[in-house]
Amino acid sequence: MSVVVGVGVIIVNDKGEVLLGKRTSQHAPYWSIFGGHVDPGETFEECAIREIQEEIGLTIQDPKVYGICNNIETYHEEGKHTVSVCLLAKYTGGKPRLMEPEKCEQLIWCVPNRLPEPHFEASRNAIKLWQKSLFYSAT
């Protein structure tokens, strides 16, 4: 088994809300920020821009890496070990659209202190790091 590297992108609007989607596929029924696996030869920023375009049809500008999380709980539950590079992008407009309805069924803007449940571990970890201005936390 190998460890997979992914990105998680927090898109934040002027009200301080984050954009979340409700998953329908392998991570159903979890709520989560958006992101995905890093392709070979791709930077974290390129991956973030590509995944956001593919998943919700938005073009994000200048995403910034702010942290990393090691998603051990998901490994124990599902047998899949993912390390997530966390990026932050400011919402600059446009209407988010469900580009992959087979993977995501709903979009919401949410206050980060009141995350909907159930919530995907990697997303919860990324939001916690951002809120606490941490690069990494072992817990």
Image (cartoon, rainbow, N blue to C red):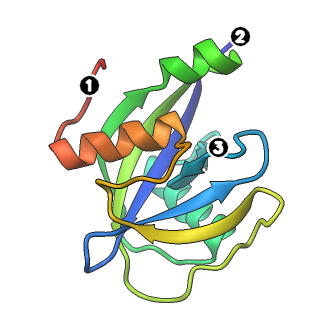
Looking at the rendered structure, the secondary structure element under dot 1 is loop
**From the viewer's perspective, is the residue at label 3 or at label 1 nearer?**
1
The answer for how far apart the CA atoms under marks 1 and 2 are is 24 Å
**Res 69 label:** none
Q: Residue at x 26, y 78 (%)?
A: 15
**Res 137 label:** 1
Q: Position of residue 75 (x, y in %)?
A: 60, 17
Q: Position of residue 31 (x, y in %)?
A: 57, 51
Looking at the rendered structure, the secondary structure element under dot 3 is loop
Label 3, on which residue?
Answer: 39
**From the viewer's perspective, is the residue at label 1 or at label 2 nearer?**
1
Q: Residue at x 25, y 48 (%)?
A: 130
Q: Going from the N terminus, do you reach mark 1 or mark 2 first?
A: 2
Residue sitting farthest toward the bottom: 94
Q: Quadrant of the N terminus?
A: top right
Looking at the rendered structure, the secondary structure element under dot 2 is loop
Please, what is the three-letter code of the amino acid marked with disc 1?
Ser
**From the viewer's perspective, is the residue at label 2 or at label 3 nearer?**
2
Could you say which quadrant of the image residue 30 lies in? Answer: top right
Q: On screen, 76 above or below 14?
A: above
Label 2, on which residue?
Answer: 1
Q: Position of residue 18 (x, y in %)?
A: 38, 65
Q: On screen, 8 above or below 53?
A: above
Could you say which quadrant of the image residue 58 lies in? Answer: bottom right
Q: Going from the N terminus, do you reach mark 3 or mark 1 first?
A: 3
